[in-house]
Amino acid sequence: MRLRSKIHLYSSVLFAAVIILMNVSIYAMFWRISTNSELMRAEAEAVTAAAGLREAADTAAMRDLLRAYVPLDGMIGIVDAHGSAEGRVTSAGEPGLSRWQLHFTEERQVRTVHFEGRSFSYASIPVIWSGGEVANIQVMQSMEAASDNLRVLGRVLTAVTLLALLPVFLSSWLLGRLVMRPIQAMTSTMRDIRGSGSFRRLKQQEGTRDELAQMGETFNSMIEQLENNYDKQKSFVSNASHELKTPLTVIESYASLLLRRGKERPELLEESLQAIHSEAVRMKEMTEQLLLLARPKEQWQVSLGQVELGAAAEESAQAFRSAYDRAISVRLPELPVTAWSDAAKLKQLLFILLDNARKYSEDEITVTVAERKGGGAELRVTDRGIGIPKDELPKVFDRFYRVDQSRTRSIGGTGLGLSLGKELAEAIGAELTLESVEGLGTTAVVAFSAKSNPHRLSYSHKSKKEEGKR
């Protein structure tokens, strides 16, 4: 069953049930009021008749006295303690009540009775005569008038119920259309997106702030995010294809050159092998970075714990001094500075930052460890290279983005380092930012919060203490 039909059916049944229940309650309440009124009237007439009969019992014939108090549509009778009827009078309209069997009761009774398929109000009042005898004054009165009124009320309520169901069904149908309109628009938009491959957004009505409007806004935000991710993915695939194609072309060219002239010109062998090796190393580095970026963050296996930043900085700097014979100074505070991080991932992040500084600066590189104002700690990697223009700084963390698009390949790099560094910093609970002045140099800042908590991070982390227990 479609959602619109469900809304129509459920709301119609609910409203119909409410209307029927309300009308049944009205009918039941009116029936109770009418019945109680008839019983009270029969009791009042029985009490009045009992008082009058007791005062005039010695002066007039009993039958004549009863005729004075008989109801217009009922009967009045007297029965003694032995169950013998001392008198009975019925109205002209109810001669059949003469067949009603009178019974003596010691207690007062007021109730509804049924006789020959009809309803009567019945009242029995004990009376003590002047001679000390006990008798019952019993009054029966037809409830036909009240029953007629109840039948009329029942017909009216039934007609009202049937008439009310029509707008109920109509309103539930309109409600279903109103609720389904934005959902149908969303479904139609999804189909258009799937069929055309282009991203579309829902048209929102101005001034509407209900849940359906919020759902439409959420849908548009989701489409915008999907479009941005699609554009980034498209650009990423294009750039990755281009970046991988270039080293493969170089390798193929030198291999072809060796096949054609390697035997005739041995001097080409060393040049070709160096170029092939360089491009192979670059392609391997790029592939590893691409695989790491493509891997879900939950699979990064980040292990958080207290890390001494000075030791991590000195270890990374020493590795680069040995590998590249570069001057790298490390500035440390008097007291050790620790932060909640992952030692291996922090070292990988420092390698990326030091490698960037090495490529774009020939002067000394400085690594500084310091405490931050207001709490926390930071690592700063500073070079005195070409710097980055101010308007380019927000883009340097995009994948494959290069500030100098025309730089020579001798510098190296894939445009993935800072993007990977940004994600590594987020994984270890830090924040990576760049400060740069064009022509003077660049400083990469890795900031650690004073309130770093591994349980607040979005990745599946395990502390070193937990690792040591296994």
Image (cartoon, rainbow, N blue to C red):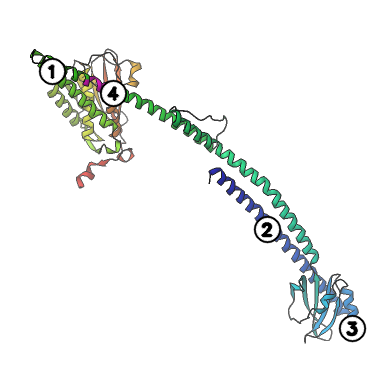
As displayed, is residue 49 above or below residue 343?
Answer: below
Q: Please say whether residue 66 is visible from this viewpoint.
A: yes
Distance CA(mark 1)–CA(mark 2) = 101 Å
Crowding at mark 3 (Cα within 10 Å: few <14, some 14-19, many 20+): few
- Is residue 463 depicted above or below 379 in this figure? below
In this view, the residue farthest toward the front is: 260
Kindly indicate whether the residue at mark 2 contacts the one at mark 1 (C-beta within 8 angstroms): no
Q: Which residue is mark 1?
A: 259
For label 2, the SS is: helix
Which residues are the magenta region? Answer: 243-248
- The residue lying toward the viewer, choosing from 215 and 186, is 186
Residue at mark 2 to residue at mark 4: CA–CA distance: 77 Å
Which residue carries the number 2 mark?
25
Q: Label 4, on which residue? A: 241
Q: Residue at x 80, y 68 (%)?
A: 41
- Which sits in the foreground, 361 or 396? 396
Circle 3 SS class? loop
Dot 2 or dot 3: first in sequence order is 2
Amino acid at circle 2: Ser
